[in-house]
Amino acid sequence: MIEVPPLFKTEEALDDKEKARRRKQNQRDRQAGRPETYPPQKEDKEHREQTLALLEELKALDETEKYYHKSECRSRAELLHWYCAFAYGKKILREERTYQDWLDLRDKCRTDLFSLAKEFLGYKDLVSRVHQPVCDMFVKKDFTNTFHAEYEREDIRQAFWRMRKTRKKDALILYPRNTFKSCIDIADIVQWLLACPDVKVLLLTAEMDRARSFIVSIKRFFAEGTSDYNDLQLLFPEYVLRGIDSTSMRPIDCPARKDALAGLDANFWVKSQSSQKTGSHADVIKRDDIVTPENATKPELREAVKESADDTENLLMKHGFLDTIGTRYAGGIVPDYYGIMLQRDENAKKEFGESDLVYLVGKSWIVKPEHAHLPLARLEFHMVDLLFPEEADTPERAFKSLRKQAFNNERMFRNQQLNEPIDDEEEGDFNVSFTDMELRARMYHREEAPKNGDVIISWDWSLGDKKTNDYSVGVVARRYKNGGNEWCFVILEIVFGKWKHSELAYQIVSLYKKWNPARTIIEASNASDYLREDIKALAQREMLLIESNIWWKPPSREENAKRNRIKGLEILLRNNRLHFVLGSWIDETFKQFTQYTGEKKNKGRKDDIPDAVSYLIYLLPPSVRFEISKNSAEEEQQLEEEQIKAFQKASQYDRIFGQRLATSRRVPGQDFLEGQNPQASTWRERLGQGKPEPAAPEPVPPKPQDPRMVIFGNKGPWRL
């Protein structure tokens, strides 16, 4: 057991090391012109007499009372020594405290988890309305009439059994991300150590690195620093960790515990959920985020988590408590482990009329009843009640952040923010689904299409003309604002086919020449450099400034990027912000939309047209567009600025020197004369001082081929 400090902290009571440290500090203060940190102490005779008198009263009270004061595990007289040595004359929560105040604050820390976390552990952002329900889920510690001079483990066990009358053995807390639930869990571990220094607490997480971070977080509250003690340490100086115990990654052995009850196990240690868990047993077990994206994506992985988590029960003492904290990842027939706990709770209530589980499920927002029928994408700020609007500077900004998350990945949002897990079988249909009725309801004649706004073109391309190749698709759309000042698209034309390099370049240039778009977006995938050269050569022959108009968009490396983009089209369609004009391409377009499932392989169905249309979302203004991938808005803003600069530079060059030379190599598939290299007119020719060269012939589209030639060749009786 830790040594009791002297009642009065005089110079003679200090050891030689502490005396030397104080002398050096005072010397540095004098050299810097500061007041001494440790000035000579003048004995306060009145305080000394009052303290000695109080000590005699406390000794007499200790002799008459069997149990220590409230939940204290030390005698009243010994506690006075700790108070005088460390807290007397010091400010705790900005006020000097008497001995009785000091005792009351110690008891408050042991029994009021919310106050402990917010006032003493530094979690200032906690809000009573949001976080008090979480604190109430944890065990209300009550060790009154437990500790006495000869207390044993049996006394502690009896206290645990009494607390089991106020809370069930198991607790499940499902709260959204970024709501400080793990911080409150850390505070609860600290409170267990303060309430019972002999307690044994085990923490389990999915990964060992995260488990070790809990040791670091908890030790920093008790670690002795170079400056004065913090408020918590002034209240509990006997718990302060010193030396290597305060900085190492070793388990925590509480200095205030009773040596006779120490045993083999530490007061607090950590393990990963999947590690071997034999030998050590605990009074309290914490499972914090044992379900992760890595172990919840497939049913077989979730089954492995279930087996490991169920094994945790063997490490818990019969009188103990088990707390599980996390957020949902999967539902359905084979849910994540949190879903299994809820299923077992329902089964136990049906079978036995009660269960050992109490749980709390929180949502980032609750939709008001009159708007419950609306999809997530159509919800507005006034339609929901936010759980924790204080996480942002304004409630409106908090809602906007949540709505972006819902747009980017609705499945993840429902799991992590609403704790409404989605069944694996529902994932594809739930995330992205189009019906023919919905699509045709957004279709009208070309004459009815809006005339305001910019024309933009997007390309999703794949080279090759074999049957198994994907289509190359070009989409022409008009981007405009509707009466509600919302950005909308109307699809004006779609071209698709299976083309080689030269043929694809011709299609891109021809579509540009026909529509003269304000912007063109093309995916910069493999072999895009060759395609870029072909486009450049054709454009120069056509006297078109297409190069600065094209945004070569790098492929997204985000998981499910295509599905998330097409999900954006579904949201636009259902919000009446995506329309189609009638055309020969409409049937194939609607066919691919309705057959799209959102699965990675899409079961062999073509989805090139929905993919190409989805690239239009990237051409919404970054300031108002939902983010499609991580940091995409910032990256695209930078690319857009760079391309504007390139366009201005090219325009300035052309104004001074005329159009630049085309590439020196011939463009494949075109019938230009051998050795000729078309060139724009020079400044002399534009001034009439030179003879302009004849214009290059009009590019000829690829010659159509008789399908019978493909099937039967150019020989056979069919040609007769």
Image: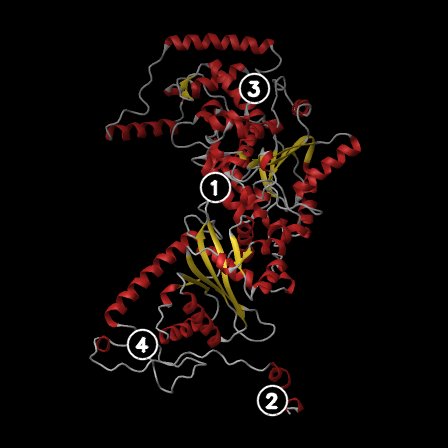
- Label 4, label 2: how far apart the Cα atoms are: 41 Å
- Sequence-wise, the earlier of marks 1 and 2 is 1
Helix, strand or loop at label 1? It is: helix
Helix, strand or loop at label 4? It is: loop
Q: Which mark is residue 661?
A: 4
Packing grade of label 1 (10 A; few <14, some 14-19, many >=20) is some
Mark 3 or 1, which is nearer the eye?
A: 1
- Label 3, label 2: how far apart the Cα atoms are: 101 Å
Helix, strand or loop at label 2? It is: loop
Label 2 sits on residue: 714
- Label 4, label 1: how far apart the Cα atoms are: 50 Å
Q: Which mark is residue 72?
A: 3
**Placement of 368 over or under 683, stated as above or below:** above
- Sequence-wise, the earlier of marks 4 and 1 is 1
Residue 107 occupies which quadrant of the picture? Answer: top right
Mark 3 or 2, which is nearer the eye?
A: 2
Q: Is residue 590 in sight in this rendering?
A: yes
Residue flagged by tag 3: what amino acid is it?
Answer: Glu
Packing grade of label 3 (10 A; few <14, some 14-19, many >=20) is many
Label 1 sits on residue: 400
Q: Position of residue 144 (x, y in %)?
A: 61, 18
- Sequence-wise, the earlier of marks 3 and 2 is 3
- Label 3, label 4: how far apart the Cα atoms are: 90 Å
Q: How is the image coloured?
A: secondary structure
Packing grade of label 4 (10 A; few <14, some 14-19, many >=20) is few
**Placement of 486 over or under 247, stated as above or below:** below
- Sequence-wise, the earlier of marks 4 and 2 is 4
Residue flagged by tag 1: what amino acid is it?
Answer: Lys
**Placement of 236 over or under 510, stated as above or below:** above
- Sequence-wise, the earlier of marks 3 and 4 is 3
